[in-house]
Amino acid sequence: MKRLLLLGGIGEALRLARRLGPTHIYSLAGLGQVPDDLTCQVRVGGFGGAEGLADFIAAEGIDLLLDATHPYAAQISRNAARAATLAGIPCWALRRPGWQAEAADDWREVDDWGGLTEALQDFQRPLFTLGREPLAHLHEIPVHQQWTVRCLQALPATPRAEIIGARGPFNLEGERELFTRLRSDVLISKNSGSQSTEPKLQVARELGLPVLLLRRPQLPPVDREFANLDEIWQALLEAGV
């Protein structure tokens, strides 16, 4: 049986890890909750770049590397592809499709934080749902704006920002209540393509709110790409994992 190293970071990776036996390794950066109920081995922490990951692959006798990290974790994905090449093993990746706008949507893509702040100039109550990055810019909040930042860890509020700690999946009713309470006039998000966080987009659609989406980064080519968990699981079975 081939030995798999699964690089996690999204819900699909955890669901796959729950199917793996004790021979395989599930690796996490450790930024969120670490599961303690898996049959497979769990490793938490970084590897020291592509070279460190390649060394780990060789030391552990890994036969296949599967990158199931977040679509915006571009550096990790680049390290994974490079490490697999250095170690001489295949690299597969879950490349979850992004969300697609509907006719009633007002979606506006931006390339980076600078483009985002420029696009936000005309709004007063933005709701950020793209992780911790806004926390580094709380001192830059314009005087006419009140921010809400939803990320994994709650932090004390600042004079013009509320920081909410929450983890998906989120439901439609809960998102409606949040938007109503905050009186948000614009939603900011990454285009993760995750079903567990998609309800916010429906609420923005219902309310006629614009959505600013951080453009997806370019990810490296790998030996095989998969759009969903079922495709990956079937391929793993066929490969003898």
Image (cartoon, rainbow, N blue to C red):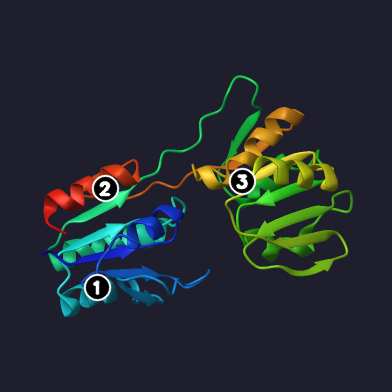
- Give the numbered dot on residue 22: 1
- Give the numbered dot on residue 88: none
3 or 1: tag closer to the N-terminus: 1
Q: Amino acid at mark 1?
A: Pro
Image point (62%, 60%), residue name: 133
Q: Is residue 202 above or below residue 148?
A: above
Q: Residue 212: image x %, image y %?
A: 65, 39
Foreground tag (3 vs 1): 1
For marks 1 and 2, give the CA distance.
19 Å
Q: Is residue 49 above or below residue 201?
A: below
> Considering the numbered disc 2 on the image, is that residue within a helix, a strand or a loop?
helix
In this orientation, which residue lies closer to the viewer: 40 or 45?
40
Residue corresponding to mark 2: 232
Q: Which quadrant holds residue 188?
A: top right
Image point (23%, 61%), residue name: 65
Q: Amino acid at mark 3?
A: Ser
> Considering the numbered disc 1 on the image, is that residue within a helix, a strand or a loop?
loop
Q: Are marks 3 and 1 in contact (CB under 8 Å)?
A: no
Q: Amino acid at mark 2?
A: Ile
Residue corresponding to mark 3: 189
